[in-house]
Image (cartoon, rainbow, N blue to C red):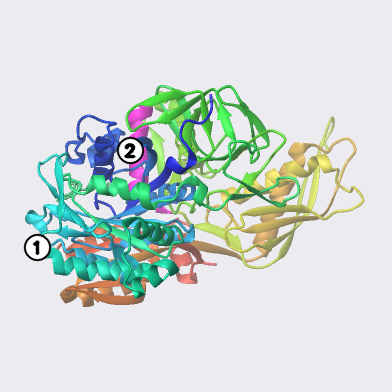
């Protein structure tokens, strides 16, 4: 069996927005109109089809992205719903990595909100063609033109209306199509019944103005259209559509549409626009990767006959089928039963089943082709970000980069049965979510979990209970500090026991060197003449890493350091892996204590929206939290304050901001970078931990 859907008829799109802008409702409606579900699920009733996890339904927010496939006219649209809360930006990031185009949903009242800005910038990085959908046109205060102006200003995007609303708030009843120069008026509440009519008389002059504006904007990058426009020739719908498509694909033009998903208006034209203006897999640049052996750059064309290249972009545990790996196939094809090569791990894997995912059901398929998004069952070793390819044609696609978790909590299983289950449960959750980590504090023996924010960890704990039936006592959230060194130093480690019988002998001389932020750990052997046999190198490296994990200064993991083996000695009979492992750890401690250990703390990017009258108090309070203000901007009656501040000072900020502003202030916060903590901060922290001394 060959490909059923030609490339030109496939769209892989993401739906991105600020929390509550209406992504889920819009996706629901898309599924409804494309005939996939036969009942409209309301987010508020907890019945939304895309939000299938219990937590999502209860909270009415989307946590995990769910890939779903639907059909509109003769097009196949693969949609990935992405969450809006900043704690889940990793989900957005991974979606953007595999999608060809995105619909940015905005609330027509609020316009551009902080999270839409963050996601927009992420999409800029990936050069994702976008269109904007101004939802909630029915809400009191909805203002189409103000929202367009905000997109243009705050996102510096060439956003141009291709539609105009007919009425707004509760009189919103239809849409003017500036391309076709017609209007549609909705006739029923379900939005199934609408009529296409000439633009109503009272909107003709507004339409004329915005149609001119549209043509002028398009003429900037379409020469033929420019000539025809200047010469007063008639410009056809097809010509306009082609120009919009061209500009959108080149990321030079953002078509703006509008509607109210909740009241079922505007969604069918949105679907048409997705098929008309979003790219097909053929229209995105060939995927780039590296040959794992030579490191040479390789490109793969979107072609079923090329060797397979696919990226695993999400791992999900499913109670029925087990581990599901979501794949974007860039080139070649894939059949059930195929053996594929995981080039990232250097391992062969077998595809057990292939599934097309719909929001609430799945369909077994035998074969999948280039340009498609599918889920595979049976891949045991594959993790998020891994490349799968044809054996003999290895390629490592650029992986997805995820931020480091910044917040930890200690958890303690309540009973012996919980204790037994917790390990597997945490392992599964970490496998699904690359921004979630779990580890044991070697000093206290406590299990710690780490994530991107308080909400993120709350959800994890909730899932532990519901999906894995593990009950745990949960400690207070703590900042995930890290340790590193600030200068080179040397150290020695000896583990020698030679009292009768078979002894132990490990002796290591080490030099440690700081590495740039984010580089993690590197180990290098610079000894010559075989003074320590090569077979002991992994043991030495492991010993060093274990010591780094426990930290030196205050028990936080050490990062960004190179350990260089510069000397040592070996004993024919007594040397063992264990002895070198211990010697490695001792040498590391010795070196690091001589070098200067510094503490790194996570710094967050913060955006606070506050009514003018509370501005002074909020700024004062932010300063006392070691916050640094970068910009302030007046928007209506509100000031938008942007800045950076340490996570350590931001716990409980939601409550404090509420009381400072009588509930009217709002903020979003997101991890930005790790930074060296000042001596005062270190001193306070050590005191709090009971060390009682300063460095
Ligand atoms: N008035 C009005 N309300 C809407 C509209 N679309 C969505 N809503 C409501 O807005 C709220 C948020 O909608 P969602 O679809 O959950 O928004 P979301 O962007 O998916 O939110 P997250 O999943 O939390 O990121 C819900 O209460 C919806 O009923 C609309 O067109 N008009």
Inter-mark Cα distance, 1 to 2: 32 Å
- Residue 380 in sight from this viewpoint: no
Q: Nearer the viewer, residue 596 or 626?
A: 626
Is the residue marked by circle 1 packed among few (<14), some (14-19), or many (20+) residues within 10 Å?
Answer: few
The residue closer to the viewer here, 386 or 668, is 386
Q: Residue at x 15, y 58 (%)?
A: 199
**Which marked residue is nearer to the observer: mark 1 or mark 2?**
1
Q: To which quarter of the image does residue 406 belong?
A: bottom left
The location of residue 236, given as percent across then percent down, is 32, 59
Q: Is residue 249 left or right of residue 665?
A: right
Q: Which mark is residue 252?
A: none
Dividing the picture into quarters, in which one does residue 38 lie? top left
| Residue 8 located left or right of residue 347 | left
Task: Answer whether labels 1 and 2 touch (C-beta < 8 Å).
Answer: no
The residue that mark 2 highlights is 73
Element type at mark 2: loop
| Quadrant of the rendered image containing residue 129 | bottom left
Check the image and report above or below for 150 versus 371. Answer: below
- Residue 202, percent from left and from top: 8, 64
Q: Earlier in the sequence, mark 1 or mark 2?
A: 2
Give the structural element (helix, strand or loop) at label 1.
Answer: helix
Farthest residue toward the right? 529
Q: Quadrant of the C terminus?
A: bottom right
Mark number for residue 201?
1
- Seen at 47% across and 32% down, the residue is 375
Residue range highlighted in magenta: 453-479
């Amino acid at each position: 069996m060959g490909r059923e859907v030609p490339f030109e008829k496939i769209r892989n799109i993401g739906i991105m927005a600020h929390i509550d802008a209406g992504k889920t409702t819009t996706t629901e409606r898309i599924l409804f109109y494309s005939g996939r579900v036969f009942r409209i699920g309301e987010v508020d009733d907890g019945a939304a089809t895309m939000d299938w996890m219990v937590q999502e339904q209860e909270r009415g927010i989307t946590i995990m992205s769910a890939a779903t496939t639907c059909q509109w006219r003769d097009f196949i649209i693969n949609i990935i719903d992405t969450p809006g809360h900043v704690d889940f930006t990793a989900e957005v990031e991974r979606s953007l990595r595999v999608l060809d185009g995105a619909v940015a949903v905005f609330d027509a009242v609020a316009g551009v909100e902080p999270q839409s800005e963050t996601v927009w910038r992420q999409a800029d990085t990936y050069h994702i063609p976008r269109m904007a959908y101004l939802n909630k046109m029915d809400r009191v205060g909805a203002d189409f033109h103000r929202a367009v102006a905000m997109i243009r200003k705050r996102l510096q995007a060439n956003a141009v209306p291709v539609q105009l609303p007919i009425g707004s708030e509760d009189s919103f009843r239809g849409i003017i199509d500036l391309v076709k120069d017609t209007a549609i008026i909705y006739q029923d509440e379900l939005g199934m019944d609408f009529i296409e009519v000439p633009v109503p008389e009272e909107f003709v002059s507004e339409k004329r103005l915005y149609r001119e504006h549209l043509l002028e904007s398009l003429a900037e990058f379409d020469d033929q259209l420019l000539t025809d426009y200047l010469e007063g020739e008639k410009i056809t719908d097809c010509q306009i559509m082609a120009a919009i498509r061209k500009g959108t694909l080149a990321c030079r033009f953002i078509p703006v549409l509008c509607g109210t998903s909740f009241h079922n208006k505007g969604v069918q034209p949105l679907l048409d626009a997705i098929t008309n203006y979003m790219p097909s897999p053929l229209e995105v640049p060939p995927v780039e990767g590296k040959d794992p052996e030579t490191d040479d750059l390789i490109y793969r064309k979107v072609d079923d006959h090329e060797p397979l290249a696919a990226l695993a972009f999400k791992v999900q545990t499913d109670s029925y089928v087990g581990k599901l790996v979501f794949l974007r196939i860039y080139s070649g094809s894939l059949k059930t039963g195929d053996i594929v090569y995981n080039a990232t791990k250097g391992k062969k894997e077998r595809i057990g089943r292939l599934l097309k995912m719909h929001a609430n059901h799945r369909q077994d398929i035998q074969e999948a082709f280039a340009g498609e998004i599918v889920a595979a069952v049976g891949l045991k070793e594959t993790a998020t970000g891994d490349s799968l390819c044809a054996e003999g044609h290895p390629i490592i696609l650029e992986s997805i980069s995820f931020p480091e978790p910044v917040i930890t909590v200690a958890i303690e299983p309540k009973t012996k049965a919980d204790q037994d289950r917790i390990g597997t449960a945490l392992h599964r959750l970490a496998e699904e979510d690359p921004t979630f980590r779990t580890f044991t504090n070697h000093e206290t023996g406590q299990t710690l979990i780490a994530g991107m924010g308080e909400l993120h960890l709350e959800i994890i704990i909730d899932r532990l209970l519901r999906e894995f039936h593990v009950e745990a006592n949960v400690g207070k959230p703590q900042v995930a500090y890290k340790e590193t060194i600030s200068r080179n130093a040397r150290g020695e480690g000896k583990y020698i026991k030679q009292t009768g019988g078979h002894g132990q002998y490990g002796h290591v001389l080490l030099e440690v060197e700081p590495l740039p932020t984010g580089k993690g750990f590197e180990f290098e052997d610079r000894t010559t003449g075989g003074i320590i046999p090569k077979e002991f190198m992994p043991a030495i490296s492991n010993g060093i890493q274990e010591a780094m994990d426990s930290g030196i200064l205050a028990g936080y993991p050490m990062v960004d350091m190179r350990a260089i083996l510069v000397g040592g000695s070996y004993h024919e009979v007594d040397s063992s892996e264990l002895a070198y492992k211990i010697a490695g750890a001792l040498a590391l401690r010795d070196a690091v204590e001589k070098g200067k250990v510094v503490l790194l703390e996570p710094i967050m990017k913060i955006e606070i929206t506050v009514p003018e009258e509370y501005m002074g108090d909020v700024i004062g309070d932010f300063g006392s939290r070691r916050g640094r203000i970068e910009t302030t901007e007046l928007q209506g009656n509100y000031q938008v304050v942007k800045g950076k501040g340490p996570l350590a000072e931001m716990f409980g900020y939601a409550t404090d901001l509420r009381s400072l502003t009588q509930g009217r202030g709002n903020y979003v916060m997101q991890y930005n970078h790790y930074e060296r903590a000042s001596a005062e901060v270190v001193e306070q922290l050590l005191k709090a931990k009971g060390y009682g001394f300063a460095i």
